[in-house]
Amino acid sequence: MVGISPQTVHQSYLMADQHRLRFPLLSDTGNKAARQFGLVYRVPHDQQEVYQRAFVNLPFANGDSSWELPIPAVYVLNQDSTILYAAANPDYTERPEPGEIVSILSKQ
């Protein structure tokens, strides 16, 4: 398992340390990989203002001024890189249930 984020390598390191993550976080500079999957969107201006009021400095964390984020997605691949499962949802609060992913992995 890996996590992929547009955050800078330094910010990813801080995130992994803060949350004690036990899997690697990879840095997708400029959302290049996310863009290939059609998962990139620009944060609307009103949401940018909300982030700024909450001291979320997205340009600093991501190392660019694009105000772009990836849509949260989950992919399960087998050893030959065949996609066994894919899910993406613009609502970041809705994620696949862990049991659903475990079920797919247990069939391998």
Image (cartoon, rainbow, N blue to C red):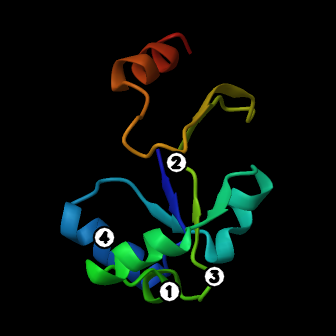
Q: Identify the mark nearer the N-term, 2 or 4.
A: 4
Q: Which amino acid does label 1 sit on?
A: Pro
The C terminus lies in quadrant: top right
Disc 3 on helix, strand or loop? Answer: loop
Q: Residue 52 or 66: which is nearer the viewer?
A: 52
Tell me the distance, in whole angstroms, between the alpha carbons under discs 3 and 1. 7 Å
Which amino acid is tagged 2? Pro
**Relative to 12, residue 55 above or below:** below
Disc number for residue 72 = 2
- C-beta proximity under 8 Å, tags 2 and 4: no
Tell me where residue 35 sits by quadrant: bottom right
Q: Which residue is drawn at 35% across and 26% down?
A: 98
* 35 versus 12 height, above or below: above
**Residue at left 75%, top 51%?**
38
Residue with the most extreme front position: 46
Q: Name the residue under label 1.
A: 59
Query: Mark 4 = which residue?
Result: 15
